[in-house]
Image (spheres, rainbow, N blue to C red):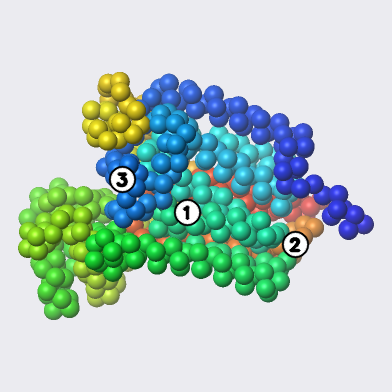
């Protein structure tokens, strides 16, 4: 009987397109999102640009693989540009990727584990489908939308690896991981998730697990070595990412109003100089600015502040060694990275109190940053970017602050709820695992373990890497309504069964 049931079980795409309920839900979701997208663009016709946007576009124009940010998003710009150079088309493609990723996550979870209660299935579908933050995310000419979409697909594929692995899943997760890594180096820890997924997969034999993990690591390692080699060739600096050193220094500079460092703590004259510049900066700024630094509200401000310690050191380096800005930016990144590590090593308590702990709170209640209210004028957009997107008409500053403010508050509150649920639900599920009735308990329980470890890894990396803002947390606002709803479904079903 079990063999016959397995033979008759529909394939994934058949389950979506031949099941009348699923077919109807998908059609409603697609039609509703098209309508909502066009309504959104009526009220917010301009996309949002920042300096990074223009850097990505310039790298795409020049096919320059070594830049301040990863080159993957510039490749994506080139790909979309080969079909159309329209800005609205680009924004639509980003939104479509987010939509498809969300629907893939929803239908995969339903197919792999099956909702027992229709209410939880509808709740999962509704919040994944009608997600207002995705409109704002897609409207940014930044890597956030594409990276978020790829990560949603990647994590969903890892659920397949744990629950129902096959060769197309193994190959596809490696490809998606590769492109996520090319888009943003935050994916550097993703291979750890792949290893966890393969180790938990009880339907994969040892050879399959070994091949899957090996292919993943070789792909990322080869990409890592290639990028590092190119950076070294162009700048003469033996680093993988120049931005990581800048970010680490930025993270520890917020400690300076609270700690007393001495030159003896640092090994090199360069680090000693940066320490001195940092103290001079803290002593010279006004009380209001100092309070912002003390409260940790500057976020990544030291990266851009021309009067801040990092830029002052950079300009001094350029003047001293007569090296261009771009090469100097990479050269000082090594110094900044060593400086940051030294401060953390010598002041771990302060680093926890004034950076890790505030950023842990940011994980649950992130700053809305640009989502709160953004405006744009194409008078502020460089000519290269205008030409790339064929922006010809003069447009005034536009924004829809009420919509943006409401969406930001709603999404921040929702993120807080989901962050707690994603940490607590796996624990509740595991405590009640013997009472939960499912046909395939082993796979489901291992998927719960994977989910909890994945959320934990994501939380730990996010907190340590950089000050968290809302656009970094959009991943949780999509996948948080996927597999966690299965856990709620099981706990609710168990409760009803126990009561009856």
Give the secondary structure at mark 1: helix
Horizontal relation, residue 343 to residue 45: left or right: left
Disc count in the image?
Answer: 3
Alpha-carbon span between mark 1 and mark 2: 31 Å
Question: From where the camera sits, is residue 449 visible?
Answer: yes
Alpha-carbon span between mark 2 and mark 3: 53 Å
Give the secondary structure at mark 2: helix
Residue ID for mark 3: 62
Give the secondary structure at mark 3: helix
120 and 161: which is toward the camera = 161
Q: Earlier in the sequence, mark 3 or mark 1?
A: 3
Return the mark for residue 441: 2
393 and 116: which is toward the camera = 393
Q: Earlier in the sequence, mark 2 or mark 3?
A: 3
Alpha-carbon span between mark 3 and mark 1: 22 Å
Instruction: Give the class, few, some or many, for how many residues have Cα within 10 Å of label 2's Cα (few <14, many ≥20).
Output: some
Instruction: Farthest residue to the right: give it.
Output: 1
Instruction: Give the class, few, some or many, for how many residues have Cα within 10 Å of label 1's Cα (few <14, many ≥20).
Output: many
Q: Residue at x 62, y 70 (%)?
A: 211
Q: Residue at x 53, y 45 (%)?
A: 478
Mark toward the viewer: 1 or 2: 1
Residue ID for mark 1: 180
Image height of 335 relative to 133, above or below: below
Question: From where the camera sits, is residue 464 visible?
Answer: no
Image location (x, y in percent) of residue 231: 30, 62
Image location (x, y in percent) of residue 176: 54, 54
Q: Earlier in the sequence, mark 1 or mark 2?
A: 1
């Amino acid at each position: 009987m079990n063999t016959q049931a397995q033979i008759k079980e529909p394939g994934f795409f058949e389950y979506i397109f031949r099941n009348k309920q699923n077919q109807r839900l998908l059609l409603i979701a697609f039609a509703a999102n098209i309508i909502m997208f066009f309504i959104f663009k009526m009220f917010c016709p301009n996309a949002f640009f920042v300096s990074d946007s223009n850097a990505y576009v310039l790298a795409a124009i020049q096919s320059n693989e070594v830049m301040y940010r990863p080159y993957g998003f510039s490749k994506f710009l080139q790909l979309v540009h080969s079909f159309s150079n329209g800005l609205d088309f680009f924004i639509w493609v980003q939104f479509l990727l987010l939509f498809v990723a969300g629907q893939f996550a929803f239908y995969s979870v339903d197919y792999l584990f099956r909702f027992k209660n229709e209410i939880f299935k509808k709740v999962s579908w509704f919040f994944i489908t009608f997600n207002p933050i995705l409109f704002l995310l897609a409207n940014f000419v930044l890597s956030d939308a594409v990276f978020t979409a790829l990560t949603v697909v990647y994590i969903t594929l890892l659920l397949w690896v744990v629950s129902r692995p096959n060769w197309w899943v193994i190959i596809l997760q490696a490809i998606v991981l590769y492109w996520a890594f090319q888009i943003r180096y935050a994916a550097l820890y993703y291979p750890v998730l792949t290893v966890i997924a393969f180790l938990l997969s009880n339907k994969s034999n040892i050879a399959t697990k070994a091949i899957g993990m090996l292919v993943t690591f070789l792909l990322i390692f080869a990409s890592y070595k290639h990028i590092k080699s190119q950076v070294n060739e162009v700048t003469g600096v033996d680093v993988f990412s120049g931005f990581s050193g800048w970010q680490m220094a930025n993270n520890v500079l917020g400690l300076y109003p609270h700690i007393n460092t001495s030159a003896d703590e640092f090994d090199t004259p360069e680090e000693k100089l940066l320490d001195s510049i940092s103290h001079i900066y803290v002593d010279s700024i006004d009380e209001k600015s100092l309070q912002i630094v003390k409260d940790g509200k500057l976020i990544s401000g030291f990266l851009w502040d021309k009067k801040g310690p990092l830029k002052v050191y950079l300009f001094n380096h350029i003047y001293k060694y007569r090296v261009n800005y771009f090469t100097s930016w990479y050269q000082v990144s090594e110094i900044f990275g060593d400086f940051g590590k030294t401060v953390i090593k010598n002041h771990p308590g302060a680093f926890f109190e004034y950076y890790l702990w505030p950023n842990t709170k940011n994980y649950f209640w992130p700053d809305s940053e640009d989502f709160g209210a953004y405006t744009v004028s194409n008078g502020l957009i460089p000519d290269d970017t205008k030409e790339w997107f064929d922006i010809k008409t003069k447009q005034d500053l536009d924004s829809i602050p009420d919509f943006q403010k409401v969406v930001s508050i709603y999404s921040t509150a929702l993120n807080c709820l989901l962050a707690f649920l994603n940490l607590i639900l796996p624990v509740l599920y595991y405590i009640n695992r013997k009472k939960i009735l499912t046909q395939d308990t082993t796979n489901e329980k291992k998927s719960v373990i994977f989910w909890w470890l994945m959320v934990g890894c994501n939380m730990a990396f996010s907190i340590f890497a950089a000050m968290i803002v809302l656009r970094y947390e959009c991943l949780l606002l999509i996948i948080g309504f996927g597999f966690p709803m299965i856990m709620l479904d099981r706990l609710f079903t168990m409760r009803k069964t126990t009561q009856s």
